Image (spheres, grey):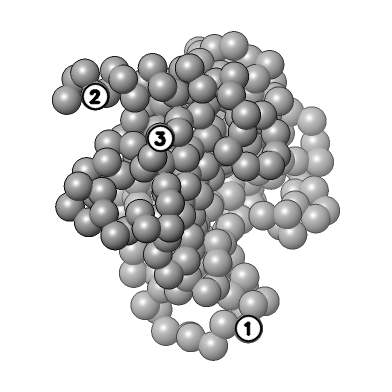
């Protein structure tokens, strides 16, 4: 197993200078064999930060290795799933905001095509502290973030209100609460979060929560983004939270999500 993992990593490294798997920008990491064609893309702002780049690529290469191992294992048990060729994977790291020249929010988007009924996608987020050169959570911005505590309950209520508005915009007929069953007043179960960009330099007007297809609705509804404004968050903020959270959401930001 260790030899296989090393071999996979070597293949990924060797292919860094190879042509891309599909049209588009040159990838920052590639893995290609008979089971899988996968690539990783970082945006230019990430590439400009050597430490952040290294962090993202370390994570991405583990994802490449894991995806390749899973594909190889599946071919052994169910080779018919590869009758249309290798599975396709892509991971994109994109900057969402840079706040106070310190906190960098990144949206990590995954695309997977295993030749099923339709391709699948997933989304997660990273909050990078440039001063400390490490990943952090939003905890430092809030007085408390206990599960089922006042901060998380207020945050979840605002998330649901935002998602409800978005569903109405899409003319979603289902008005039941079934779609919110997986959302909980907990940092680990409320959704992947970023600091939203602001019209005011050095600030964020609130939090955006990112949900892939299936997370808060059927696949056909697509992905969702919920916005929680700073006015809702203000009673729960620490001095650092009060320092960086404010301003307004740029016009059109919601439409770009």
| Alpha carbon separation for disc pair 3 and 2 | 13 Å
- Closer to us: 197 or 228: 197
Depth check, mark 1 against mark 2: the one in front is 2
- Closer to us: 40 or 95: 40
- Give the position of the C terminus as an image quadrant: bottom right
Q: Which residue occupies 41% across, 26% down?
A: 61
Task: Relative to 83, say whether 95 is above or below.
Answer: above
Q: Tags 3 and 2 in contact by the CB under 8 Å rule? A: no
Q: Which residue occupies 48% across, 85% down?
A: 175
Q: Which residue is mark 1?
A: 171
Q: Position of residue 164 (x, y in %)?
A: 56, 73
Q: Which residue is mark 3?
A: 33
Does dot 2 land on a helix, a strand or a loop? Answer: helix
Q: Position of residue 51 (x, y in %)?
A: 54, 12
Depth check, mark 1 against mark 3: the one in front is 3
- Give the position of the N terminus as an image quadrant: top left
| Alpha carbon separation for disc pair 1 and 3 | 43 Å
All told, the count of numbered labels is 3
Q: Position of residue 17 (x, y in %)?
A: 59, 19
Q: Which residue occupies 67% across, 76% down?
A: 169
Q: Position of residue 59 (x, y in %)?
A: 41, 26
Q: Is residue 53 left or right of residue 179?
A: right
Give the mark nearest the N terminus, 1 or 2.
2
Give the mark nearest the N terminus, 1 or 3.
3
For label 3, the crowd category at 10 Å Cα-Cα, with few meaning under 14, some 14 to 19 and many 20 or more, is: some
Q: Which residue is mark 2?
A: 4
Q: Which residue occupies 34% across, 46% down?
A: 188
Does dot 1 land on a helix, a strand or a loop? Answer: loop
Give the mark nearest the N terminus, 3 or 2.
2
Q: Tags 1 and 2 in contact by the CB under 8 Å rule? A: no
- Closer to us: 55 or 255: 55
């Amino acid at each position: 197993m260790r030899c296989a993992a090393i071999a996979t990593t070597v293949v990924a490294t060797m292919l860094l200078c190879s042509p891309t798997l599909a049209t588009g920008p040159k990838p920052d990491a590639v893995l290609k064999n008979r089971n899988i064609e996968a690539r990783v893309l970082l945006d230019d702002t990430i590439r400009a930060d050597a430490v952040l780049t290294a962090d993202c690529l370390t994570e991405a290469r583990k994802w490449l290795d894991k995806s390749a191992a899973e594909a190889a294992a599946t071919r052994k048990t169910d080779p018919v799933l590869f009758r249309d060729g290798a599975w396709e994977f892509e991971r994109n790291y994109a900057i969402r905001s840079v706040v106070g020249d310190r906190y960098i929010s990144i949206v990590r988007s995954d695309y997977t095509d295993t030749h099923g009924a339709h391709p699948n996608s997933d989304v997660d987020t990273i909050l990078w502290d440039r001063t400390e050169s490490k990943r952090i959570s939003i905890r430092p911005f809030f007085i408390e973030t206990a599960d089922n505590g006042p901060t998380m309950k207020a945050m979840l209520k605002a998330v649901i209100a935002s998602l409800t508005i978005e569903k109405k915009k899409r003319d979603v007929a289902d008005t039941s609460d079934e779609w919110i069953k997986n959302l909980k007043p907990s940092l680990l179960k409320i959704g992947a979060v970023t600091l939203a960009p602001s019209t005011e330099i050095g600030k964020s007007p609130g939090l955006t929560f990112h949900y892939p297809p299936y997370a808060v609705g059927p696949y056909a509804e697509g992905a969702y983004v919920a916005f929680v404004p700073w006015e809702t968050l203000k009673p729960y903020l620490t001095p650092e939270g009060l320092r960086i959270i404010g301003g307004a959401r740029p016009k059109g930001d919601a439409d770009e999500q």
